[in-house]
Amino acid sequence: MREPLRLTDVTHSYAGDRRTTPSLDHVTVDFPAGSVTALVGANGSGKSTLLGVLAGTLHPSHGHITGLPDAVALVPQHSAAPDLFPVTVRDTVAMGRWRDRGLLRPLTRHDRHLVDLAMERTGVTGFAGRTLADLSGGQRQRTLIAQGLAQQAPLLLLDEPLSAVDAATAELVTRAVAEEKDAGTTVIIATHDPVQAAGADRVITLDHGRVPA
Ligand SMILES: Nc1ncnc2c1ncn2[C@@H]1O[C@H](COP(=O)(O)OP(=O)(O)OP(=O)(O)O)[C@@H](O)[C@H]1O
């Protein structure tokens, strides 16, 4: 049995944020290994911040995290992808293999297979050669999800993966999450979608940076 991912008394405030309450306020919560957790809560309640702290892009001012695996895949919201990013869909997904391969070494046949597979799972194979700048919000979101899947990390963090996608793509994402869980991946999804939340093993609600007891 793998150790659960655990945040203990985690507090985070953004530099320059003048509010009196932190963005995460003494959060203590467990994420059992291999489970799917939905993070819900109003805009600004701290969902993306919690994902950032787990991904290591944000650093808590207080508290600690245990049970973090070596590799964590964070899929940001599509709006986080720069509009003029002059890189193709395939190259964006292939970036998901950089951690294992390094920036300068060519991808192996296995890497390329994982990239192809991730593109198929999110339905972006048809526009693999187009640049991100030429894509719709939903197509960009699917590309970012494919990049996250290609990483094959034991912890997958999805920030509002359904925010820009149509019903058919939502089904692809739902299926991909179920497959990740079957493969033993711990999945945490920040979502405003009640159906997606209902499909998770657990739902954690954030309220002004707190997880109510
Ligand atoms: N870069 C930043 N600098 C300062 N404050 C920030 C920054 N990012 C977020 N915040 C603040 O931190 C709080 C938590 O934001 P966060 O983005 O984590 O919320 P969220 O629950 O993901 O919201 P949403 O549902 O709108 O995506 C908010 O009050 C927000 O204004």
Image: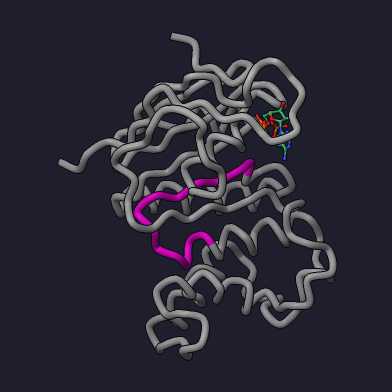
Magenta stretch, residue numbers: 148-160
Counting from the top left corner in percent of width and height, residue 138 is at: 74, 55
Whether 152 is among the magenta residues is yes
Horizontal placement of 116 versus 89: left or right? left
Q: Quadrant of the N terminus?
A: top left
Q: How many marks?
A: 0
80 shown above or below 152: above
Horizontal placement of 54 versus 80: left or right? left
Q: Quadrant of residue 29?
A: top left
In front here: 50 or 151?
Answer: 50
Outermost residue toward the top? 213
Horizontal placement of 33 versus 132: left or right? left
Q: Ligand 1 is found in which quarter of the picture? A: top right
Counting from the top left corner in percent of width and height, residue 81 is at: 73, 59
210 shown above or below 94: above
Q: Residue at x 67, y 78 (%)?
A: 128
Counting from the top left corner in percent of width and height, residue 38 is at: 50, 31
In front here: 195 or 88?
Answer: 88
Q: Residue at x 64, y 64 (%)?
A: 143
